[in-house]
Image (cartoon, rainbow, N blue to C red):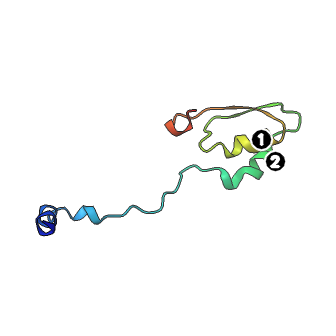
Amino acid sequence: METAVSNLFQNFDFFGYSFPKPQYLGAKYIHRKWIANEVPADCLTVLDAFAGSQSVAYSLKQMGKRVLTNDFLNFNFV
C-alpha cells in the first residue's frame, strides 16, 4: 500500500516545497516609537489607515489618543 501511495505522487515534486518564513510586508511594528514621536502633543485623534496587526494603534491608544483604524485584510475583522 505504501508503494502504491508513493507511486501515485511521484510526478509531483512541488509537494516537497516549503515556503520561506513569512514576512509581513508593510509592518510598522519596529517603527512604533518613531511614529508616536511624530504625532503632535495637542492631537487628540489619530487615524491608522493601514492598521495591519494594530501595533501602532495600540501604542497610540496607550498614549491616550483616540484611534481610528482601517484595513481591508480579513484577519483584522473582529
Which tag, 1 or 2, sits closer to the chain's start?
2
Q: Residue at label 2?
A: 37
Q: Is residue 66 above or below residue 11?
A: above
Callout 2 environment at 10 Å: few (<14), some (14 to 19), or many (20+)?
A: few
Q: Quadrant of the N terminus?
A: bottom left
Q: Residue at x 52, y 34 (%)?
A: 72
Q: Residue at x 73, y 50 (%)?
A: 32
Q: Is residue 50 above or below residue 15?
A: above
The x, y position of residue 6, in whole percent, is 16, 66
Q: Residue at label 1?
A: 60
Tag 2 secondary structure: helix
- The CA span between labels 1 and 2 is 10 Å
- Could you say which quadrant of the image residue 44 lies in? top right
What's the mark number on residue 39?
none
Disc 2 marks a residue whose amino acid type is Asn
The x, y position of residue 18, in whole percent, is 36, 64
The x, y position of residue 69, in whole percent, is 66, 33
- Could you say which quadrant of the image residue 49 lies in? top right
**Discs 1, 2 touching: Cβ within 8 Å:** no
Q: Residue at x 81, y 42 (%)?
A: 62
Q: Quadrant of the C terminus?
A: top right
Q: Residue at x 48, y 57 (%)?
A: 22
Callout 1 environment at 10 Å: few (<14), some (14 to 19), or many (20+)?
A: many
